[in-house]
Image: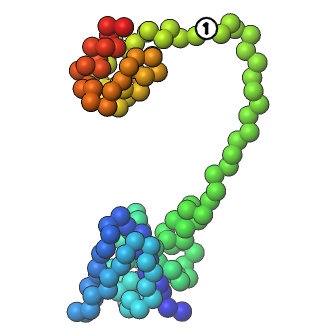
Amino acid sequence: MSLSLTYAGWRNYTEIKYNGTKYGFAPGMTRTDIPEEFIRKEIVPSLKYDAKMWVVGGLEDPDDQTIAMQEVIKETPVEETTTPMQVNAPVVEADATAVSPDLSSLTRAKLMSLASKMGLKVSPSDKKIDLIERLQGE
């Protein structure tokens, strides 16, 4: 059985070279024309050290890292069902004018969102310093 090699890396394109022949890969691309000797000699050992940019198909060894990686990828997350809890404590609404004192750590987009939630007029041309002054002044 021949081995297949799938590129699972982040680059748009990558090449491997073996015996003067270049083999090109795009993300998610699987090739079966790569020499098995190269895959077993170069790729499979790297998978044992957590290399995640290659997936080797057709290996017979069930303890191989690629098979374990494929099982993890195929696992579906389990959805937990929760029942609503009854709370007897009174509901206290947050004061709309209460603003965190460290506004400079927020991004401009977060500041614009906060200002609009507080009912302040926001313009796309507002600068971060203007938004901070407006939020602290209100």
Give residue 129's position: percent from left, percent from top.
Answer: 23, 21
Q: Does residue 71 sit above or below 14 in this rendering? A: above
Q: Amino acid at mark 1?
A: Val
Give residue 97's position: percent from left, percent from top.
Answer: 44, 9
Label 1, secondary structure: give it.
Answer: loop
* Residue drawn where x is 55% and y is 62% of the image: 73
Q: Using the image as rendered, state which of residue 110 and residue 63 is in the foreground.
A: 110
* Residue drawn where x is 54% and y is 92% of the image: 1
Image side of residue 19 versus residue 111, left or right: left
Q: Using the image as rendered, state which of residue 114 and residue 121 is in the foreground.
A: 121
Image side of residue 117 versus residue 107, left or right: right
Q: Which residue is mark 1?
A: 92
Give residue 127's position: percent from left, percent from top.
Answer: 24, 26
Q: Quadrant of the C terminus?
A: top left
Q: Is residue 32 visible?
A: yes
Give residue 111's position: percent from left, percent from top.
Answer: 35, 24
* Residue drawn where x is 38% and y is 19% of the image: 121
Instruction: Give the number of marks.
Output: 1
On the image, which quarter does residue 136 sit in?
top left
- Answer few, some or many: residues within 10 Å of disc 1's Cα (few below 14, many 20 plus, some between 14 and 19): few
Q: Does residue 73 sit above or below 112 in this rendering? A: below
Image side of residue 68 versus residue 26, left or right: right
* Residue drawn where x is 68% and y is 49% of the image: 78
On the image, which quarter does residue 23 sit in?
bottom left
Image side of residue 78 versus residue 126, left or right: right
Q: Is residue 68 visible?
A: no
